[in-house]
Image: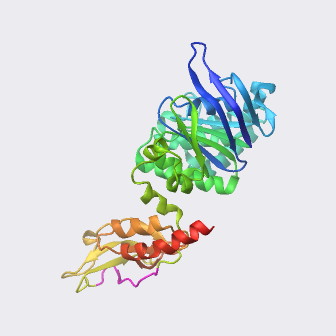
Amino acid sequence: MIEFRGVTKRFPDGTVAVDELDLVAEQGRITVFVGPSGCGKTTSLRMINRMIEPTGGELRVDGRDVLSADPAELRRGIGYVIQQAGLFPHRTIVDNIATVPMLVGSSKKAARDRAMELMEIVGLDTSMAGRYPAQLSGGQQQRVGVARALAADPPVLLMDEPFSAVDPIVRESLQEELLRLQSELGKTIVFVTHDIDEAIKLGDKVAVFRVGGRLAQYDEPGVLLSRPVDGFVDNFVGRDRGYRGLGFLSSDTIPIGSLPVLSVGDPLPDDGWSVVVDGSARPLGWVEAGEGRVTEEVIVPGGSLYAVESGSLRGALDAALSSPSGQGVAVDADGRVAGSVTADSVLEALPAARDSHNAA
């Protein structure tokens, strides 16, 4: 657990970067700091590992005041991931990851063995172990940065806009990877971003900062979207917060409809659209009515998929709206076609989902 108790950071020129911050980042959860430029979110993060020294208040990590700890010892228990990974360019990937374990006394072999394990954990092919950072893509470098931060098995992980320098597709995959890792490892993570969508997706709780380093609101993402405390938070979260809020409403009551299914080589449908599946019943895309047979050339990309067992109203609605047929493809836990959902069925399920969410 990380506790900010009236923490302030005032620089020598009189600038107040963080002003009387009171906040608790819960153990084993992801806490996201978000806000406009100059709001103090990165300064707040860096005070946790004393890269920046607080000038007032009290900051505790697992009950210990950070100012009473030796900085080097403190940092050995805190992983740190920054933009563009910050890797050592002259060291191989395996040696970049093994750096901290070797510094704290592990043998070179043990440190490298652990580094190879971590490469697999963060989704990197171990055949890349002997490469250098410049030989990797931006997304791969960020995965190395996460692996290096995890190498000493720290209970706390600080992440300062780690995915902001990669393209949107890679960024989304890195976000999913982080959520997967967190479900397995249960670290106490503080994550800084300027992107409200990223904050809402990743955070168990989200802290919105104002310019001047003051905390505006600290809540679970669903509460932040549905009940912003004032106009600043409302504007920062965005005008489409109602749509984002669907991501926190269960889709359990949405009926799953039937869906015409074809395989490559089958005759094209006589009417409307049909979904094309592979040999394992996983969707490949859509085909429209016409003459001839289903070939790879006539398959139309199908939009997003709606995962029935872990779905939300937002996921169901997005699947329906992004589909060329107007029907979203619902899939089971193994990715096989389970049926269809429509935008109308999502809207019909909305009142009951809201009532259930508010009751919880």
Q: Quarter of the image for the C terminus: give it.
A: bottom right
Q: How many marks?
A: 0
Instruction: List x then y, in percent, for residue 190.
Output: 63, 41
In terms of secondary structure, what is the magenta stretch mainly? loop
Q: Quarter of the image for the N terminus: give it.
A: top right
Q: In the picture, residue 155 is in which quadrant?
A: top right
State the scheme by which the image is colored: rainbow
Q: In the figure, is residue 46 to the left or right of 354?
A: right
Q: In the figure, is residue 11 to the left or right of 245?
A: right
Q: Classify 345 as above or below 236.
A: below
The part of the chain drawn in magenta is: 255-266
Q: Nearer the viewer, residue 324 or 267?
A: 324
Instruction: List x then y, in percent, for residue 351.
Output: 48, 72
Q: Farthest residue toward the left? A: 291
Q: In the figure, is residue 250 to the left or right of 243?
A: right
Q: Nearer the viewer, residue 327 or 345?
A: 345
Q: In the picture, residue 299 is in which quadrant?
A: bottom left
Q: Nearer the viewer, residue 266 or 30?
A: 30
Q: Is residue 61 visible?
A: yes
Indicate whether residue 102 is drawn in magenta.
no
Instruction: List x then y, in percent, for residue 83.
Output: 52, 35
Instruction: List x then y, in percent, for residue 347.
Output: 41, 72
Q: Farthest residue toward the front? A: 230
Q: Is residue 123 visible?
A: no
Q: Nearer the viewer, residue 41 or 143?
A: 41
Q: Residue at x 48, y 33 (%)?
A: 134
Q: Classify 67 as above or below 135.
A: above
